[in-house]
Image: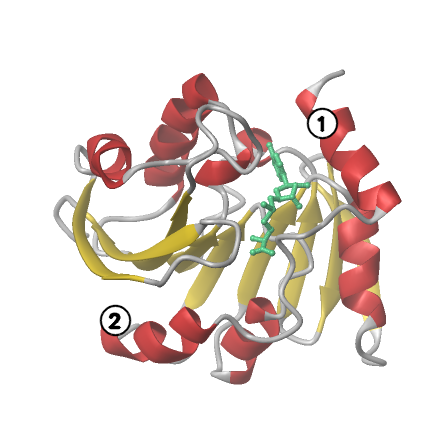
Amino acid sequence: MSMENSWRQRWQEGRIGFHLEETHPALLKYWPTLGVPSGAKVLVPLCGKSLDMRWLADQGHPVLGIELAPEAIEQFLAQRSGGISRYTQAGFEVCRQGNIELWCGDFFHLHIQQAAEVEAFYDRASLIALPPATRERYAFHLAQLVPPGAKGLLVGLTHADGDAGPPFSVPDEEIERLMAPNFRIERLAQLPADARGRSESIWALERRGPRV
Ligand SMILES: C[S@@+](CC[C@H](N)C(=O)[O-])C[C@H]1O[C@@H](n2cnc3c(N)ncnc32)[C@H](O)[C@@H]1O
């Protein structure tokens, strides 16, 4: 089965153990330390139906989430009664609710023109959703989409179940190797392991290169 279909099947069957029913504690704790100005648009790759997007929007950030599974987007929108506008842009179905826009489709098809206003990013559980070779592509594509100086928070995950996934275990060394060519990167914290031995790591990133 293709990666795309297996994610859609997960959403259809409700196998979404990664989803949190609250704002991620690391977002609450560490986002304010990045110093991203209120009003800066935040890219949320592989966003699922994460409530973290609501929190970011409540801080004054326009949010651009991108997600493969229409099921995730519809479930996200159904959480609130706010009016929804729907349109097609650059081949993506886009839904907007308040200052959150959700693009339904493949992150790798999102082009820099569509991300033109993005100034920051928030990435939880994207790398760990992707097999090794795709993680390389992901890191490169993210770097292409965000401008020099863009800051982001990244939440990774390691586990002791070997190469199995998703979630794939992505060790610190790999996150550094993938991101360091294009981002200044600092590990902020390692959260305690849960009952299944899964532990999240929290990183601050800043896109390298001269600001224009
Ligand atoms: C592990 S989940 C994390 C979701 C969210 N960030 C969170 O913290 O709840 C990964 C999500 O990425 C989506 N996805 C996987 N590959 C994708 C791709 N190439 N483009 C867009 N979304 C993708 C899946 O459907 C899934 O909802």
Disc 2 C-beta below 8 A from ligand 1? no
**Which tag, 2 or 1, sits closer to the chain's start?**
1
Task: Please indicate whether residue 66 sits to the left or right of residue 45 in the image.
Answer: right
Element assignment for label 2: helix
Residue at x 81% of width, y 80% of height: 82
Q: Is residue 37 visible?
A: no
Q: Which residue is mark 1?
A: 4
What residue lies at 61% left-to-right and 48% top-to-bottom? 66
Asked whether, in this view, residue 134 is left or right of residue 87, the answer is left
Residue denoted by label 2: 34
* Screen quadrant of the N terminus: top right
- Is the CB of mark 1 within 8 Å of ligand 1? yes
Amino acid type at circle 2 is: Leu
Locate residue 28: give its quadrant: bottom left
Q: Quadrant of residue 127?
A: top left
Q: Position of residue 150 (x, y in %)?
A: 28, 56
Considering the numbered disc 1 on the image, is that residue within a helix, a strand or a loop? helix
Three-letter code, disc 1? Glu
Along the horizontal axis of the image, is 27 left or right of 109?
Answer: left
- Image coordinates of residue 53 in percent, x first then y, are 58, 68
Badge 2: residue crowd in 10 Å (few <14, some 14–19, many ≥20): some
Above or below — where is 103 with respect to 91? below
Q: Quadrant of ligand 1?
A: top right
Is residue 22 among the parts visible in the rendering? yes
Q: Position of residue 42 (x, y in %)?
A: 46, 62
Q: Quote the CA–CA distance across marks 2 and 1.
A: 33 Å
